[in-house]
Amino acid sequence: MKPRFVAVLFLLLVSVPMVGADYTDPDLEISKGTVPGHWKIHKFGHNEALSTNLETIWSGSNIYTYPPAATIMNLTSTDVDDNMGGSGAWGVTVYGLDGNYDMINETMQLNGQNPIPTTLKYLRVYRVFTRQAGATGYNEGIIYLGTGATIGGVPVNKYAIIDQNYGQTMMTQFTIPNGYTGYLKHFTITCFTANKNFESYLRIRWIGESWRRMEESNMITGSGLTVPYNPPLPIIAKTDIEFIGKVDVAGGVTELNYDLILVKDGYSLITDATQNVNIVESIDLMSAEFVVFTMVAALLTYLGSTNKTPGDRMLRFGVAFLFWIGSLSVWISDGGGFVPLLVLIAPTLMSLVWTVQALGETTDHPTKKDIYSVY
């Protein structure tokens, strides 16, 4: 086998696995950031003191009140050691939405019980977490983001709460940002307190409308429940998502988490766990058909490069190689089989004609005999 043919075959075989690579975990690819327009959200929260009346599942132990308009909020703590250089938390990052429901965020420094205003105006806040801390390694007080008068670090209107030593809000509320559709994949709720019966509800509210219950769950102490949505439940932009609950005897503890995929307008949703995200898996690299395909493609490329005229040789090599790429694309879309192989017949015959023509052509370079005859 000639070295040139071996080199071409090696090139084709090396490039094929990159085309036939198999990625079958869309969630992983979304988390890796390789799927444009997709963003995965994992939300979780708790309510450690549910009452016999409905309450939002968050740290506030009440029905959550949303800001009436986008506004500057104040960051405070109940502990003076939560400040830059102190033994507690030094600063936090705030995630939320502005007045247009667009996603915004900023990082702020704490100053104990003294209110520090945000730079941005927030219509919604859905996550706040600490970034750095002093000797203790966590927030020593309860951190609030809110509005109104503040006494001892506690504001009148509370929109985000970080419990002592938690380092992050435990709020299940979320609002679908502008320009996105949310797809709820599942939620899991768990109850802990003994001798109690729990009720919980998933409810949503689109901008300008009233709350609408989407799911109801009833549990006993120590139980958990996972509710999957297959296919995922679509939730349009600017919709508030909230979980509420109550218990038959006051003082119940419950925890909830769920996963959302945010899909930007203009992008398709990937939901099937067996679907490829980046590269199709339709080619069986060990199949007889694909081995034949590779061999024929390599032979075609080799024959296209055998012309003795350098210009024609490069032209025909390029045509042959580009045809191989096109044929491979047909192979992928067709899922394999012999049909794409039949498409190779015409250019192969063309290459054979070129090769026969090349055998009858003379070269512009003098032979060894011609050189000696000059002298």
Image (cartoon, rainbow, N blue to C red):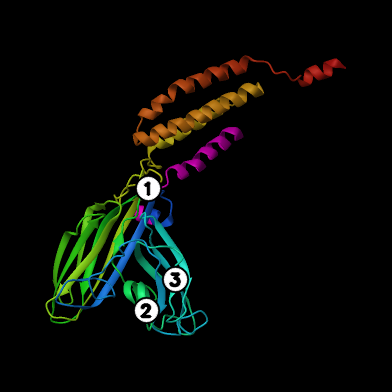
Instruction: Give the mark, 2 or 3, whose residue is nearer the N terminus.
Output: 3
Mark 1 vs mark 2: in front: 2
The one nearer the camera, 155 or 265, is 155
Which amino acid is tagged 1? Val
**What secondary structure is marked by label 1?**
loop
Question: Gap in Å between the C-alphas at discs 2 and 3?
Answer: 12 Å
The picture places residue 311, in percent across and down from the top left corner, at 64, 23
In this view, which residue lies farthest toward the right?
A: 375
Foreground residue, 129 or 349? 129
Mark number, residue 150 = 2
Report helix, strand or loop for mark 2: strand
Look at the numbered discs 1 and 2 and tell me whether their residues touch, using CB distance below 8 Å: no
Q: Residues within 10 Å of mark 3 (few under 14, many from 20)?
A: some
**Residue depicted at 47% across the width and 68% down the height:** 107
Mark 1 lies on residue = 277
Q: Residue 247 lies in what quarter of the image?
A: bottom left
- Name the residue type under label 2: Thr
* Among numbered discs 3 and 1, the one appearing first in the sequence: 3
Q: Secondary structure at mark 3?
A: strand
Q: Residue at x 48, y 80 (%)?
A: 83
Name the quadrant of the C terminus: top right
Residue 77, x across and y down, in percent: 40, 80
Q: Which mark is residue 185?
A: none
Q: Tag 1: Cα neighbours inside 10 Å, few (<14), some, or many (≥20)?
A: many
Disc 3 designates what residue? 117
Q: Residue 249, located in which quarter of the rendered image?
A: bottom left
**In this picture, is 353 found above or below 264?**
above
